[in-house]
Image (cartoon, rainbow, N blue to C red):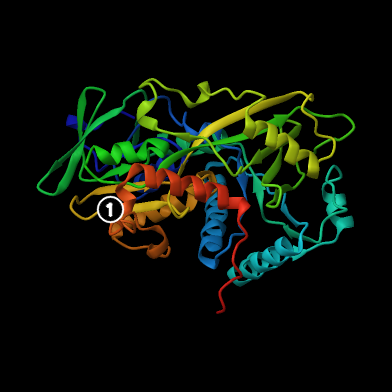
Amino acid sequence: MPAAANNAYDAIIIGTGVAGLSTAMQLAARGKRVLALDRRGISSGATRQASGLLGQMRSTVASTRLLMDSIRTLQEIERLLGQQVYRQTGSIRVAQTPERATELRGHVEVARAAGLKVEFIDRDRATQLMPYLRTDDLLEIAWCPEDGYLNPPELAELYHEACKATAVHLRDFCPVTEIVVSGGSVQGVVAGGETFRAPVVVNASGAWSYLVAEQAKQPLPTAGIGHYYYTLAPVAEHPVDANSPTLRDRENLIYSRPAAGGLRVGIYELEPDQYDMESLPTDFEMSSLVPKADHPSVVELIEKSAVRFPFVRPDLPMTLHTGIMSFTPDGDPLLGEFAGIGGLYHCAGFGGHGVVQSPAIGLAMAELILDGTWRYNPDELEADRFFDMPQMRDRATVKARCAQVYADYYGKLSPPPAKR
């Protein structure tokens, strides 16, 4: 649709990944004129590089319910647009040590308290669901029938179609160079040599989010962390059906899903790559990152994969992938305003969960911006929850904390659920 007169909008979204597009879509659905800007192509950042698992079981009831809301919201969007991107295949979570078995039982307890369908299954049932899965060493196996996966670019396109059908104007290759602030409130942005005016600006710029926040002199504690996965070409003797479940094996630090007739497997390694986004070229494209087969993370990924999928070998045809995730010091996203600048909202730091959280996040951001209400627990999500911690304004400290959160994502045993 044509741009607003005099470049004036109700809201400007910086970043067109799934979180930004979902927020733009929900604001437009409430009658707001929205401009969504991207430094490069539409949804060309972490969204396009994401692996696409949609799992709902988490270590707290609140985070589990948020993801349950996301799945329901996504299915409503699919029905509204007459398109389907989500494949509900179910998921399997495995434990092969007594400690991991205890952890998994705790996660199941939390999931059931949140109302998520989950049950324990035996090895025979797991083998029926995933014939290529090694099960002889497993002590506990949990089955979540309502989980699944999707291809993230298809989700971005779904949001894109919804945005084009409403009052959202999209501009690509239009990097924001200034956030305009006057009288303690945001007035708009300068991007691509033009000034765009709006009383609301949303920083949804992914791994670049802390740099965008710095334009307004706000210390957003996020950091860019590298992530690796591969897509294995189909193997005739070990077929992976598109309706096979996804898998999470925390002890081996890996997850998997069907992809392109083969198997996609990723790792949350203990020593991840870290990125200083300001050191990258202004025309940097995340798709330009090409992993090497001898990278330590790739070597470990294939070794860990072979433990759970014995047919996997480094000489099999596979495509290696990597991207840059945006993490926070506690692993939860940063949503909302900082004191001092009204109308500047942050929507960043999803730590690899941006795809699965995005349907619910768009709703939450629209309600926060327009109604001033929180759909979810603000204590876990408020953008300024680190504001009174001076150490969280030091980039080296933030980077170290974020890298540890990434390493702990699978590597650290979750504590037992709190007594209710």
Q: Amino acid at mark 1?
A: Glu
The location of residue 88, given as percent across then percent down, is 68, 49
Crowdedness near tag 1: few (<14), some (14–19) or many (≥20) residues, C-alpha within 10 Å: some
Of the pair 164 and 215, the residue shown nearer to us: 215
The location of residue 310, given as percent across then percent down, is 84, 39
168 on left or right of 18? left
Q: Could one spot residue 295 in this view of the protein? A: yes
Quadrant for the C terminus in the image: bottom right
The location of residue 384, given as percent across then percent down, is 31, 56
Q: Residue sitting at 63 percent across and 32 percent down? A: 296
202 on left or right of 19? left
Q: Is residue 55 above or below residue 213?
A: below
Q: Could one spot residue 171 in this view of the protein? A: no
Q: Residue sitting at 60 percent across and 56 percent down? A: 412
Quadrant for the N terminus in the image: top left
Of the pair 151 and 235, the residue shown nearer to us: 235
Q: Residue sitting at 80 percent across and 30 percent down? A: 313
In the image as oriented, which residue stretches furthest toward the left?
Answer: 183
84 on left or right of 188? right
Residue indicated by mark 1: 337
Q: Quadrant of residue 109?
A: bottom right
The location of residue 94, given as percent across then percent down, is 75, 55
Q: Is residue 400 above or below residue 47?
A: below
Of the pair 420 and 173, the residue shown nearer to us: 420
Tag 1's secondary structure?
Answer: strand
Q: Residue sitting at 69 percent across and 63 percent down? A: 104
